[in-house]
């Protein structure tokens, strides 16, 4: 990450210290809590990384030792939750071409927490992300749910569940990405063979689970440990959700068919043709995480992508979230997904929920993040105006009460405004460095 100027660093350090040691009250902004109606002139009080209170001016008791921050004229809403991202050094993590099914692969072992794409996502208002391997395999590995904190190691970004496990799912895919007909003999050459291989893997996982249970007291008869099958057993037990890349309507129905057969929890990712099978998706009770593009294209199976997909799924009663698939959509443009979905007929409220609380539900973290409510993590963003306006800027991003992005800091502004070079802090990308920052200070 680029080093901030001294004055900016002192300001950010001071705000962080207040967030850690005493309450902070943000006064006068329009607050969009997501779980309720907007508050035109509100107060948000945070303490020790949590939301303490919020409400209209005059209705909230501010602690006597609180620091007051005037945000009159601004908008505050929950930190954005990205349910499908590849920041942190992609494609340096995920499965390889040695096998089409690799559930044992852990994305945590390939993420670079110091990669500048993390700061770029912060500048887009993203506070929580589901970092996933790519979609070139039927099962490409274990995803990881993280807070985009400014830290030196991925372990410090991990979201830990109450039972001590790292929060995450399993990435699966179907369609053309995982079909390789020429040079990869182990990979399927058709959609039907793709589904057959997945069935075989889950059948093997069920047998592995049953043998472990049958011989729990006899180590001599227990099967040898298999990391891949262990992961699929977690899926069968509902301890991991399948995050399933799928575009075409027939591929979507194949995923639903597999869900019925094996009973796993699944979130449908991308669903370019979800509008064609919205009723079937709703009947299956599964959520969808949509990618919303302003310039559709890229692959033939996404030919019938439509902005109205969010609206059609919303009307059918499907839980809808949005994602960036960064680098496919730059994390800095995540708010635009909601605006385009509204243009396609989705409700404003539904689109804002799809950026926040719905994605929190998709990641099963809605008790902690996704809305501004007392007791939840103090993850929020400060905007210059309405979140769906093309003229609005994200000015600050807070995670657990700590400022991780401030547009008044020249280093952070570079992440917000620079080209792709702003995400690669190496000498060949000098075109994107700000003249306000001394070059030697940044290396």
Image (tube, rainbow, N blue to C red):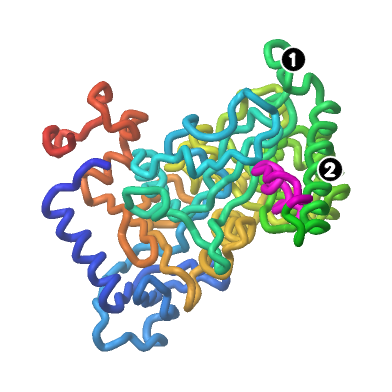
**SS of the residue under disc 2:** helix
Q: Position of residue 153 (x, y in %)?
A: 36, 48
Residue 68's place in the image compared with 300, above or below, is below
Residue shown at the point (23%, 68%) measured from the top left: 17
For the residue pair 365 and 71, the one nearer the viewer reads as: 365
For the residue pair 202 and 417, the one nearer the viewer reads as: 202
CA–CA distance in space, label 2 to label 1:
25 Å
| Quarter of the figure with the C terminus | top left
> Is 65 colored magenta in this rendering?
no
Q: Position of residue 161 (x, y in %)?
A: 55, 64
Mark identifier at residue 134: none
Is residue 440 left or right of 347 when viewed as pictured?
left
Residue shown at the point (69%, 39%) measured from the top left: 172
Q: Position of residue 176 (x, y in %)?
A: 72, 24
Which residue, given by chain and number where applicable, does mark 2 sit on?
203
| Quarter of the figure with the N terminus | top left
**Crowd around label 2: few <14 · some 14–19 · many ≥20 (10 Å):** some
Q: Earlier in the sequence, mark 2 or mark 1?
A: 1
Q: Which residues are magenta?
A: 220-236
Residue 204 in view (yes/no): yes
Q: Position of residue 358 (x, y in %)?
A: 62, 59
Which residue, given by chain and number where applicable, does mark 1 sit on?
181
Snapshot quadrant of residue 195 = top right
Snapshot quadrant of residue 185 = top right
């Amino acid at each position: 990450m680029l080093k901030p100027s001294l004055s900016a660093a002192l300001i950010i350090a001071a705000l962080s210290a207040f967030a850690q040691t005493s309450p902070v009250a943000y006064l006068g902004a329009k607050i969009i809590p997501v779980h309720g109606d907007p508050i035109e002139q509100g107060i948000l009080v945070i303490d020790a990384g949590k939301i303490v209170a919020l409400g209209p001016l005059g209705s909230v008791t501010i602690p006597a030792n609180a620091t007051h921050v005037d945000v009159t004229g601004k908008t505050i809403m929950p930190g954005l939750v990205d349910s499908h991202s590849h920041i942190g050094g992609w494609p340096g993590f995920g499965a390889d071409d040695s096998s089409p099914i690799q559930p044992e692969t852990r994305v945590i072992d390939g993420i670079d927490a110091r990669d500048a794409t993390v700061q770029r996502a912060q500048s887009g208002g993203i506070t929580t992300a589901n970092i996933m391997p790519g979609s070139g395999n039927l099962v490409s590995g274990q995803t990881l749910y993280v807070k985009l904190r400014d830290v030196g190691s991925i372990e410090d970004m991990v979201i830990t569940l109450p039972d001590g496990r790292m929060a995450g799912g399993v990435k699966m895919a179907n369609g053309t990405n995982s079909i390789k007909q020429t040079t990869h003999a182990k990979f399927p050459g058709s959609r039907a063979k793709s589904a057959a291989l997945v069935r075989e893997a889950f059948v093997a996982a069920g047998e592995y689970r049953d043998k472990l249970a049958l011989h729990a007291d006899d180590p001599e008869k227990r099967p040898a440990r298999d990391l891949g099958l262990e992961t699929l057993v977690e899926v069968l037990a509902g301890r991991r959700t399948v995050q399933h890349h799928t575009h075409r309507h027939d591929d979507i129905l194949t995923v639903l068919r597999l869900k019925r057969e094996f009973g796993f929890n699944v979130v449908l990712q991308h669903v370019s043709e979800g509008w064609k099978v919205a009723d079937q998706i709703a009947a299956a009770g599964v959520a969808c995480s949509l990618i919303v593009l302003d310039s559709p294209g890229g692959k033939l199976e996404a030919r019938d992508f439509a902005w109205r997909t969010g609206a059609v799924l919303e009307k059918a009663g499907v839980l809808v979230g949005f994602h960036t698939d960064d680098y496919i959509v730059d994390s800095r443009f995540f708010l635009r997904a909601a605006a385009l979905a509204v243009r396609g007929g989705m409700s404003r409220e539904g689109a804002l929920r799809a950026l926040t609380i719905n994605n929190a539900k998709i990641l099963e973290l809605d008790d902690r993040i996704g809305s501004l409510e007392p007791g939840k993590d103090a993850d929020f963003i400060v905007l210059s105006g309405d979140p769906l306006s093309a003229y609005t800027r994200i000015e600050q991003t807070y995670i657990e009460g700590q400022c991780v992005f401030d547009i008044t800091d020249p280093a952070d502004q570079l992440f917000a405004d620079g080209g792709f070079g702003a995400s690669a802090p190496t000498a060949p990308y000098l075109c994107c460095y700000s003249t306000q920052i001394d070059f030697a200070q940044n290396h």
